[in-house]
Image: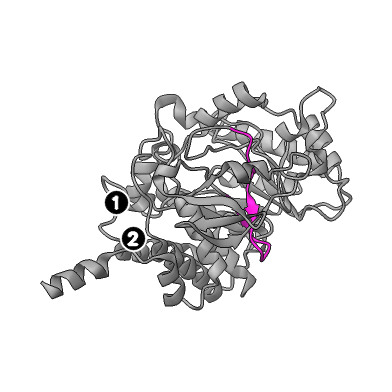
Amino acid sequence: MANLNLAIKEKRPLSRAEVTEKYPDIPPLVILKADVQRRGVHYSEAALGALDLELHATTGTHIFGARDGKIAARPESFLLRDGSSIITTPTPLELDPYLVDLHEGRPFLFEDGEPVEEVDYWPRPDFYDKTSSSGTLMQNVVSARPQRLNIFPYRYCTFWNNGNGCSFCDIVTQMKKGKEELGIPARLDPLEVKEVVREALLEPGRYAALFLTAGSNVAGKRAFDDEVDYYIEILQRVGELFSVPNIPSQLIGTAFDDGQLERLYRETPLTSYTADIEVLGEELFNRHCPGKAEYIGYKEWKRRLVRAVDIFGPGRVNTGLVAGVELTSPGGYKNEDEALARTLEEAEDLASQGVSTVYIVWSPRPGTAIGDQKNASLEYYVRLAAGLHGLRGKYRLPIGFDDYRRCGNHPDSDLSRLHNF
């Protein structure tokens, strides 16, 4: 019986304290960040009361939703004491999230009733309360993370038209909520985007990069031509604000063909390109991303990523994973060891050809196909972060365009603060 009890104990997922002790080479705040993203957060009434609407950024133009399925006035997110961001997922208390509450008058993360770490709510940009020439609240045209401007040109993905949206995604649901509850335009005017970015840049030294993303759009003479045309128009308008040909910028788009990639590079000030494959492994890709599989396919998606390196250059191309969906049922990997090995094997194939892989922690969303399942253990996310960071070291791939300052959503790229190759 003692041996059986030992076996059961060994299978128990490690706590955050145990993971921190087991992996001393991973900064404790990176481990904490991964765990907060994994479990989500819930704001107490006192924490919400500490929200200063003049000083702090509040929930605004999400392209994806929250685990509690609500749009509400609460902190957009918060910073840790090392300056790194946590992109939080508001979560009901019954799902056992971290609690944000006050401790000695300051917002803290609490775990099991104990204060863990002090946090600072994101600062509110100066331009948020202004309106554009059309009368639209500027926050609903361009949003911001602490050091990055976000442009979400539209909030729709045409893969949803025939029920082939990704299994973990709720982009269309959030589009409808944002339009109804916040007055967010369904499609942005490129001239209005330029107007708002110009206003944002009046706050000196605030922003390190500009970011652009939307859902896939299959329309056009060739599939995705309309998507590319729209991105080009927006990037060209924004580029008119600068006296240099290229600006620190990232586009997360579909895996475009060679001609479309050449146009993005040649006709815009864009400096980095990302096409999220979402999950590594062809069978899992087909299961979780049926729209992407239908129009492009797993092998072709990877080929286009590699081709983008030839165009944008090494260290300027990556792909993203929604880490944890590879373990869901049916069809997922049998255990975390297998998932880690298979994922890193595929990621190394890409890294050896100049493509970085980063991940976000999957947060199950209500109403999605796999929204009722659980994500992976904290230890899995820490091992994955170390593995992906190690691949960038092995193949000398810098990740500065998607690091803790310019994004803040990837525990693995936060490690670039230790070594940015």
Q: Between 171 and 382, which is closer to the camera in this rendering? A: 382
In x, y percent, where is residue 345?
Answer: 39, 66
In x, y percent, where is residue 143?
Answer: 71, 40
- What is the magenta segment's predominant secondary structure? loop
Residue at the farthest left position = 1
Could you classify mark 1 by the number of other residues whose Cα lies within 10 Å: few (under 14), some (14-19), or many (20 or more)? some
Query: Where, by quadrant of the figure, is residue 73 drawn?
Result: top right
Residue at numbered disc 2: 339
In x, y percent, where is residue 121?
Answer: 68, 50
Query: Where, by quadrant of the figure, is residue 138 drawn?
Result: top right
In x, y percent, where is residue 68?
Answer: 48, 37
Residue at the farthest bottom position = 24
The label shown at residue 76 is none
Residue at numbered disc 1: 332
Question: In this picture, is 85 found above or below 56?
Answer: below
Q: Amino acid at mark 2?
A: Ala
Left or right position of 200 against 272: right
> Which contiguous range is marked in magenta?
72-87
Residue located 68% across and 33% down the image: 230
Question: In this picture, is 44 found above or below 28?
Answer: above
